[in-house]
Amino acid sequence: MTSFALIGAAGYVAPRHMKAMQAVGGDLKVAYDPNDSVGVIDSHFPEAHFFTEFERFDRHVDKLRRRGEKIDYVSICSPNHLHDAHCRFALRSGADAICEKPLVLNPWNIDSLAEIERDTGRRISTILQLRLHPAIIALRDRFKASGKRHKVDLTYITSRGRWYYASWKGDDAKSGGVATNIGVHFFDMLSFVFGPVKRNEAHLREAERAAGFLECANADVSWFLSVDRNDLPVSVQGKKTTFRSITVDGEEVEFSEGFTDLHTKSYEEIVAGRGFGLDEVRASIDIVSTFRNLPVTSGHEWRHPSMRVVRS
């Protein structure tokens, strides 16, 4: 049976990882989180050991290794700025790592992780779930050989309350900002479908929202991201807390459904040796890291989800 450890057991996304572990026939041996609101473990792995101190978690993982019961995978759902350190912990503990997005905040962190992979012989896989979404795969297949450039508009709004700004997610140094925290998997999807990014522009960069432009190999992409519920289209306000829209050449791409089981599919691929590694993740990390450091240029237009045209 495949054995797992989990870092960040109290996080929002952790239950998806626990469900995925169950689905692949795995066993969660030990979990860690500095917060102890982890009763969700009872629904999945009630026998798992749990620690609120990393040092005790580390000692337990090492004890299992010395007993010949080493952990196969360490799943990482911790705050973004800790992913790098927790991946290194996993590999040095003799385990492979499964890390939530974004794998790291800057591309040079990928280079150091690649060195540790070589030193330890272990592997880091990251959750790039949109690459496994049937609608996105169909989109890539459709435009792969089109031979022409496309115009793409991406809008993603996911409402967050006041807690967001009091947590690590509201701290750019820890989360990487809105574009990194909620946008990195969309940027990965865009480069996956439309090819490498040749130009990256920042048109708006605020605590609640961001907007910009990407020139991909086969598409020109205007994008808008927000965590402010006031940015939701009027038609969905009071009904939904999230709005996703991608149009290609004016045609809406429907991908609102099918998100539920993508973590399970990701785990199935990883356990089968087909996970997304460091090479696959680099493009999206380059995009968000570059955006974070670009000067914001004014005089550009993008279509706000309210359907009004906004100028920066």
Image (tube, rainbow, N blue to C red):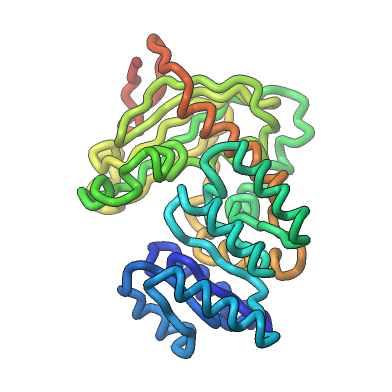
Quarter occupied by residue 206: top left
Give 295 or 308, whichever is nearer the viewer. Answer: 295
Quarter occupied by residue 251: top right
Q: Residue furthest bottom?
A: 47
Q: Residue furthest top?
A: 299
Residue 160 lies, with reference to residue 224, above or below; the image says below
The answer to whether residue 266 is visible is: no
User: Which residue shows up at 44% across the image and 65% down it?
Assistant: 8
Quarter occupied by residue 307: top left
Quadrant position of the C terminus in the picture:
top left
Count of marks overlaid on the render: 0
User: Which residue shows up at 23% across the image and 38% down it?
Assistant: 230
Give 290 or 131, whichever is nearer the viewer. Answer: 290
Quadrant position of the N terminus in the picture:
bottom right
Q: Looking at the picture, how far across and down is residue 10, in whole percent? A: 37, 68
The answer to whether residue 43 is visible is: yes
Q: Is residue 32 left or right of residue 92?
A: left
User: Which residue shows up at 69% across the image and 26% down it?
Assistant: 218
Give 242 or 306, whichever is nearer the viewer. Answer: 242
Q: Looking at the picture, how far across and down is residue 211, in whole percent? A: 42, 27
Give 201 or 177, whichever is nearer the viewer. Answer: 177
User: Which residue shows up at 62% across the image and 47% down it?
Assistant: 136
Q: Is residue 234 left or right of residue 58?
A: left
Q: Looking at the picture, how far across and down is residue 91, in whole percent? A: 66, 62
Q: Looking at the picture, how far across and down is residue 198, in whole percent? A: 65, 22
